[in-house]
Image (cartoon, rainbow, N blue to C red):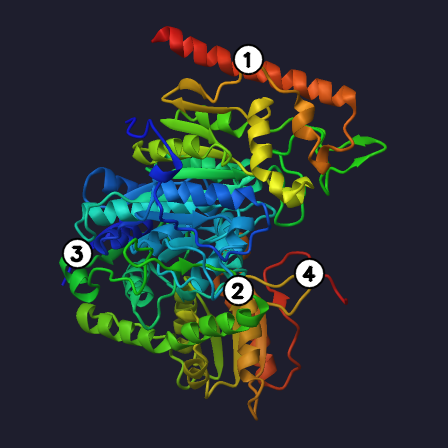
Amino acid sequence: MAERKGMEVSIAIAEAASVCDVDVVAAYPITPQTHVVEHLSELVADGELDAEFVPVESEHAAMSACCGSAAAGARTFTATASQGLALMHEILFIASSCRLPMVMVVANRALSGPINIWNDHSDVMTERDVGWVQLFAENGQEAVDLVIQAHKISEDKRVVLPVMVNFDGFILSHMIEPIELPTREMVKEYLPPFEPAQRLDIDNPISIGPVGMPTVYTEAKMAGEAALRNSYGPIVEAFDEFGEKFGRRYRPVETYKSEDAEVLLVTMGSISETAMSWIDAKRAQGEKVGLVRFRMWRPLPTQDFKKAIANAKVLTVIDRHFSPGGAGGPVAQEIKYMLYGDEKRVPVVECVAGLGGRDIEFEDFDKMYETSVAVKGGAPVPPFELVQVRGGHYGEV
Amino acid sequence: MEKFNVYAARLLPKEDFVATGHRACQGCAEVLAMRLVHKALGRNTIVASATGCMEIISSPYPESAWKLPWIHIAFENSASVASGIEAGYKALMRKGRYPERKINIVAYGGDGATADIGLQFVSGAMERGHDMIYVCYDNEAYMNTGIQRSSSTPLGASTTTSPSGRQSIGQQTWKKNVPEIMVAHNIPYMATINPSYPFDLHRKVRKAAETPGPAYLHAYSCCPTGWRMRPDLAVQIGRLAVETGAFPLYEVENGKYTINEPVDEFRPLRDYLKPQGRFRHMTDETIDIVEARLHAEYRALQAKARANQEEK
């Protein structure tokens, strides 16, 4: 077993990429991701990681270079956040459509404007439809472990898709945590050298990224959809094998004190840990409350989620982003989609909180819980709410 | 370096890597330039394409005109994609996971992809020193979307977004000098090429391939459709472009300028403009201004070449 050491989570993520023996890192600095790429360039400069560090001139170029590097058959890693992810937007679709395996960590940060460098999920949620596998970490250890598993998933010949690992900016990226960093030898057993399913090879020329006419575009889209949906099995296998080797077992949907819970919180990312502390406090008062959280966001683990919430009377969904002028928070939207066909639909209380780095505190949970308990008692389900906003809502529309 | 001093048609390689049957227009000298570039580069080449005419005419799935490994990601970023390919193979070869061999990594884009939307990407790739070649196939407008002006469109040309009219001479700005912008990156090799001069083109492409580090080639690419001219004049117009001083052929090796196909006495610019419908509306006054400026630029180029000569 590897040693547990206190280290900054960003540094630990860079070390995780390093023990994966990545071949190419193409990245551009952006707060709060910078320490990840800084440390990777240090590792390369010191000869501890034998890789090409490509210091590109923008995130768009970073993702473009990653496409080239993955197409060459090299193990490819990058990291970004917020505006950087938004700048990559165009290329994210193409990376998945061309079936280019790579791993990107996203230090989740609010999108401008107003400009704000702190944490929420507006960056990743606006990239929901890019066709990538999308995973969420809730602490530093999970982020490290997910980077290693992400390479395994991405390169699996049954998957061959890019994988995004989300971890909360500042709240995790700049936190010093006790981390158990697997050694390179241990990782090599789990993650053998990358053997690409196809590559740009002068001995066997192929064309990647040709024009898809209306006669083939739909089929190409279906192929991508099938690849992403079918990645579920290999992802769970990668989680299980990691659990056996490293002793930490991951699941597509994680639960906490959920079995007998009447009110179930649904979260993603680091607020899950605050939620757990709050749940412990509530449980001590005899309240039947629990937590469900998505580790896997794409592909959407519908069956796991429905199993996890089977006994709940109310779901309290905490979104870190919302669709302006639209249907509220993205996580709540998708949960409602999953529940729509059910005979007895569990009510969903939609809360949007923790925008642009605002802490979600026990009092916020209390407030959301109060609404949820009222709904459980038969009160009408309120429209989605920015629970922490000062000055009240906009009123009737 | 200079292994290819003597050229004759029968001495050029027979093999082509851009196959026939592609969907380019009649008389397209852009695809001609591309075919000649890849004839010169040969089999050990990986190509990153920008979106544009050369992408759509060569890759309508399930067809491909490419006998080489070829990738297309998006419009503006072929230089970055090629950076990644180069970095990938460099790492794999160093780590012993791919056999050591010389691979030409080539990115290409049109003038829109190079001078406008992709300028940052080309600049980044050249500045970082990747061992790669970037080729700009310059047909002087956004032809793929239907002849819109770019910053590489010459002054006076009528396009669909710089139309000539009662209040307009057509394109109102001078052609952006991308070759000189690339020279300013201090790259080891920059050359302008023109498929109407196939031997000069072949020699320069070979030189670009043999130069370690980044090389930039700027290819004059006549587009009869967009220039509103007879397709059978495509090669002839390319020669007129050089003979009138509209598109000088030159190369810059580690900062040293050489003019190729030097012109002692310019042919009148009108000989070049007249066959092209895009210049049909130009007044004598505008033509004179353009001609004077082209000559002045040519003299400036000659001065740089002479200065290098004297240093030697």
| Front tag of 4 and 3 | 3
Mark 3 highlights which residue?
A184
- State which tag comes first along the sequence, 2 or 4: 2
Identify which residue, B267 or A136, lies in the foreground.
Answer: B267
Parent chain of label 4? A
Q: Residue A30, can we see it? A: no
Callout in the foreground (2, 4)? 2
Disc 3 chain ID:
A
Number of residues whose C-alpha sits closer than 10 Å to that of mark 1, classed few (under 14), some (14–19) or many (20 or more): few
Q: Same chain for marks 2 and 4?
A: yes
Residue located 32% across and 37% down the image: B131
Residue A217, image x, y percentages: 54, 69
**In terms of secondary structure, where does tag 2 sit?**
loop
Q: Secondary structure at mark 1?
A: helix
Q: Position of residue A230 (x, y in %)?
A: 39, 77
Of the numbered discs in the image, which one, if any, rests on residue B299?
A: 1
Q: Say what amino acid the circle numbered 2 marks.
A: Gly
**The residue positioned farthest toward the bottom in the image shown:** A343
Label 3 secondary element:
helix
What residue would you read off at disc 4?
A392
Q: Are marks 1 and 2 in contact (CB under 8 Å)?
A: no
* Spatial CA span between label 4 and label 3: 53 Å
In the depicted structure, whether residue B81 falls above or below residue B183: below
Residue A15 x %, y %: 25, 51
Q: Is residue A234 visible?
A: yes
Alpha-carbon span between mark 3 and mark 1: 61 Å
- Of all chains, the one bearing label 1 is B
Left of A23 or right of it: where is A185?
left
Q: Quadrant of the C terminus of chain A?
A: bottom right
Nearer the viewer's eye, disc 1 or disc 4? 1
